[in-house]
Amino acid sequence: MRDFTYYAPTKVVFGRDSVAKTGALVKEYGGTKVLVVYGGGSAVRSGLLDKVTASLDAEGIGYVTLGGVKPNPRLGLCLQGIDLARSEGVDFLLPVGGGSVIDTAKCIAYGMANEGDVWDFYCKKRTVQAALPLGAVLTISAAGSEMSDSSVITNEDGMIKRGYSSDYGRCRFAVMDPQLTMTLPAYQTASGCVDILMHTMERYFTKEDDTMLTDQLAEGLMRTVMDNARILVREPDSYNARAQIMWAGSLSHNGLLGCGMEEDWASHQIEHELSAAFDVAHGAGLAAVWGSWARYVVKVKPQRFAQYAVNVCGVPLVSEDPLVTAEKGIVATEQFFHEIGMPVNIAELGIDLKEDQIKELARKCSNDGTREIGGFMKIDRAGMEEIYRMARG
Ligand code: NZQ
Ligand code: ZN
């Protein structure tokens, strides 16, 4: 087991009608003038935004709003948000939405508290030294940004999607009412479930031994997500299934399941280029590349994939050779993706990937051949090309 630091400072207020507590939470954390950030309209249509602003009014907290965050959020709107927040004297950020909205708010929080070009942080040229405080009202179980230290932004100049991680970006609080996720289209619900699984797998597929407790937490979480994602296909209004998945979404990405592990994140890096170039839903993009990544790396430690197959997918141990069991686990995962309406290759995302596009995706993913990705197995530019080729479908 590796040494680790575990830091999860976000206060979670979970359950039915928890949104009414938002204003009091902002006050508790010192906000007096709030920038409410939201997406393309779902929070307006559902009446959620009115509930949030009513709870701010009830506490006498002033606010301005910034809507229009797109999935795979763009830098341009973040810069607009920084200008608006400065001119309005904002001292607290309140994203109402999913990962895209929360990540936009984190970027604004960095831009408000640090001099210079905020994109420098995402390019790893500088590190954040402070941030405006923020708290989130979560509307989709997926990215885990409500408890994570990450923010992922796409620069329209070249469509470069990059993540930045800093404890300054941790939300002070997260309001989580599973009922809010009932207005999600089935595709977004399923895509979110894949992302939650992947945040767990990116940590679970490790070369580290002696990780029994973290393994069992991860395996339990993955089984929970798979079982409840299947329930939601049949019963999208199941509060319990939505509640299990919502809590799993936060725990999968707040660092808990990385304790003692060497993490991987190659599938995420490979996917980020896809969603930057083709604007696909992040979770769906992960489903499309994961099987190819798994088959590319499995030989590094087939026992690990066999353990996953048995403990998560319920595959019986049929062979002495762990590679056989491992492959059955990969197939079972792909069957699960199909069951919930997710793709298992890039063609199923509706993209006919050409060879020159594969080369371009790998060029960007490898920063022009200057970086390798992955922990379970290091993957260079040629390896990235191969995985995109395998995933083409
Ligand atoms: O914009 P609106 O109208 O709100 O619609 C959104 C959007 O179209 C819709 N939606 C959200 N809540 C809804 C709803 N529709 C109806 N009812 C609701 N309650 O869902 C769509 C997707 O929203 P988005 O915020 O993009 O989803 P998600 O949470 O999956 O976030 C994806 C982004 O997060 C990044 C991804 O790369 C992607 O850019 N990630 C962020 C991470 C982090 N900060 O820790 C980690 C992840 O690995 C991920 O990379
Ligand atoms: Zn993700």
Image: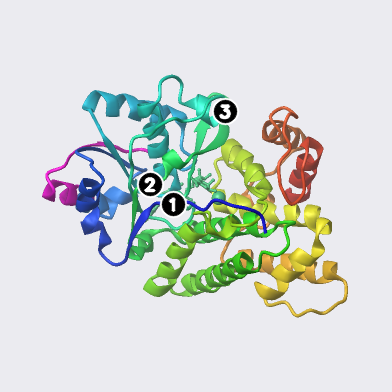
Magenta segment boundaries in residue numbering: 52-68
Cβ–Cβ under 8 Å for marks 3 and 2: no
Find residue 148 and report its horizontal and vertical position in percent.
47, 49
Query: Which residue is tagged 3?
Result: 123
| Residue 70 can be seen in this image | no
Residue at 40% x, 68% y is 243
Q: Give the Cα distance between marks 3 and 1.
A: 22 Å
Position in image of residue 222 (x %, y %): 58, 67
**Mark 2 or 1, nearer chain start:** 1
C-alpha separation, residue under disc 3 versus residue under disc 2: 22 Å
**Residue 357 location in percent, x, y?**
71, 35
Q: How is the image coloured?
A: rainbow
Whichever of labels 3 and 1 marks the residue nearer the N terminus, that label is 3
**Residue 367 occupies quadrant:** top right
The answer to whether mark 3 and mark 1 are in CB contact below 8 A is: no
Question: Residue at label 2?
Answer: 171
From the viewer's perspective, is residue 29 above or below residue 141? above
Mark 1 residue type: Met
Q: Which of the two residues, 337 or 204, is positioned nearer the viewer here?
A: 204
Q: Is residue 209 above or below residue 144?
A: below
- Under circle 1, the secondary element is loop
| CB-based contact (under 8 Å), mark 2 and mark 1 | yes
To which quarter of the image does residue 104 belong? top left
Residue 300 position (above or below residue 101): below
Identified by mark 2, the residue type is Cys
Q: Amino acid at mark 3?
A: Cys
Residue at (41, 56) in percent of width and height: 140
